[in-house]
Amino acid sequence: MFLLSLPSDILIQTIGHLSVADLLSLTQTCRKFHQLVHDFGWRNILCTLHRPSKSLTKGLARWTPLAQFKYHTLSDRSWEKQRFIARPLSRPWKGKLQPVLAINESRLFVAAGQTLYSYTFALSEDEGATPGISFEASYRFSLRDVPRNDITSLACVPDDGADRTLFVGFAHGQLERVRVPPCNPGQLDIPIDALSRTPFNYHKDELIEALATSGDSLLSFSTNGKACLLALSSSTASSLPNAMIDLDTRAWSALLSTTASTPFAAFGTSSDTPLAIHSITPTSISPTPTLTLGASSSSSSSPEHQDNDPDRELERPTAVYGIASAPPTSPWGASDQILVSGWFDGLVRVHDMRASRAPTLTFADPWSFEPIYAVACGGGGAAHIAAGSARHSVVAFWDVRAAGRGWSVHAPGNDISPVYSIILESSRLFGATQSRPFVYDFGPAVRPETYPSLPRTRGVDGLSHKNGWDHVGFYVTKYDHPSAHVGEH
């Protein structure tokens, strides 16, 4: 056979241009091609599959490239069929809290009140089975159970692979760099002492509403509109912020991008211009916006044009509660210049800053008119948008490749709470209501041991197991959108 006589490097280059179907056929021709495809072909295919997923990074790295490809393919198929496991990660907390989530490659952190819950990601040796999640421990920041001590924002930061360090924002205005101490599995209410905490008093007594990280920078945003930029490499208790500005408006959300061609910070506020873009450098934040992104197609392209356009319709004050980067494989391309945001009017808007300040697309759940508290992007095909609503624990999903295919699902327990925080990965969505954290898992072979067991509890907390799922999943209410794609401008 002529092909077998070619040098291996030429064959490897040729294999890199083959489709999945071609690779499957090639593996059945002879042992040599089977081995080449095993060693190089599936690895090449994986390079074309951008499926960001921090909870799976270390677990899937132990699998063969073929096993990883199968996992992502089966997960994408589950997204297409809206087939998933819905599961709470804990029993309900006491009281009504406003939790926040943060994630790195080793842990999921859930902050509720003055307590930080840590969940670790397992390293699965069973190729094809979804890597598991285990409850690690809970930590207490304060013994006084008062709202002023509540955690209001979280952000994981690099720490040489230990994955135990994060920045924490509090309702009393303190910003702290915290290194979570070692623990015994399942240990509860471990106090975090002063040696594990580095305070930064930049915001005085203003509640820290949002934290965002990018590269070596951390952006903090307090409730009255004060924004601080801090270099992570020099963050000590005595260090001053690299830059500080005061927007003097009610603040809600922030996003930081230091990798964009023109680095920027995006701020979500309650104002006439609720989504504003400010250019940044390592040592400064522009005090005035370089671009304000509007809610309608009547908006012009820059602040200067807005001021000079007498025909421009004045936009009513509104609010932007959540901001995220665009889905990695969206039709617009993986660009930092595309933002997804959740608004007070219940719409999710997509803006392409390269085009204009008007939204490129808008999405909505036609059965829900509540504000959008959180947005995230990823999911099946790395092409989904998820949005957490302000009531009834609803999370809505849209596939940007087929914008009319939207659907929504209530969190386990179907309570009336908002969904305060969400993280969307290739096969999982993590979320948190006022009652507890939860997960939707679209991956294959989810088993009872994949997630923490729920302790027995007295009374009813709204949960019932779903038949046919081996006591893994729970019933949730799900519905399709009759007209998911609201607008294209």
Image (cartoon, rainbow, N blue to C red):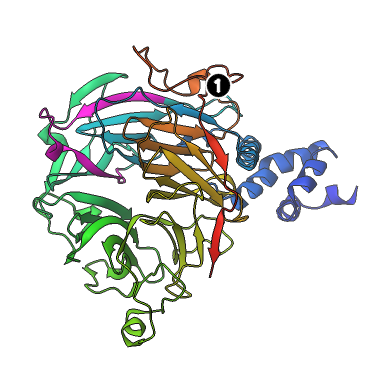
- Up/down of 312 relative to 226, above or below: below
In-front residue for pair 399/428: 399
Q: How many numbered marks have been drawn onto this rendered protein structure?
A: 1
Between 450 and 100, which is closer to the camera in this rendering? Answer: 100
* Residue 380 vertical position relative to residue 438 in the rendered view, above or below: below
Crowding at dot 1, Cα within 10 Å, few <14 / some 14-19 / many 20+, comes out as some
Q: Which residue in the rendered view is the most extreme toward the right?
A: 1
Residue drawn at x 54%, y 36% as measured from the top left: 478
- At a point 33% along the width and 63% down the height, the residue shown is 266
Residue drawn 30% across the image and 57% down it:
254
Q: Is residue 295 above or below residue 96?
A: below
- Where is residue 458, by image quadrant? top left
Res 218 visible:
no
The residue sitting at 54% across, 39% down in the picture is 427
Instruction: Where is residue 421? Give x, y as percent.
Output: 36, 43
> What is the x, y in percent for residue 370?
39, 49
Q: Which residue is disc 1 drawn over?
A: 466
- Which stretch is magenta? 134-159
Q: Where in the figure is residue 214, as x and y percent of width and height? A: 34, 56
Local secondary structure at mark 1: loop
Q: Is residue 279 visible?
A: yes
Residue 139 magenta: yes
Q: Amino acid at mark 1?
A: Lys
Would you say 362 lies left or right of 231 here? right
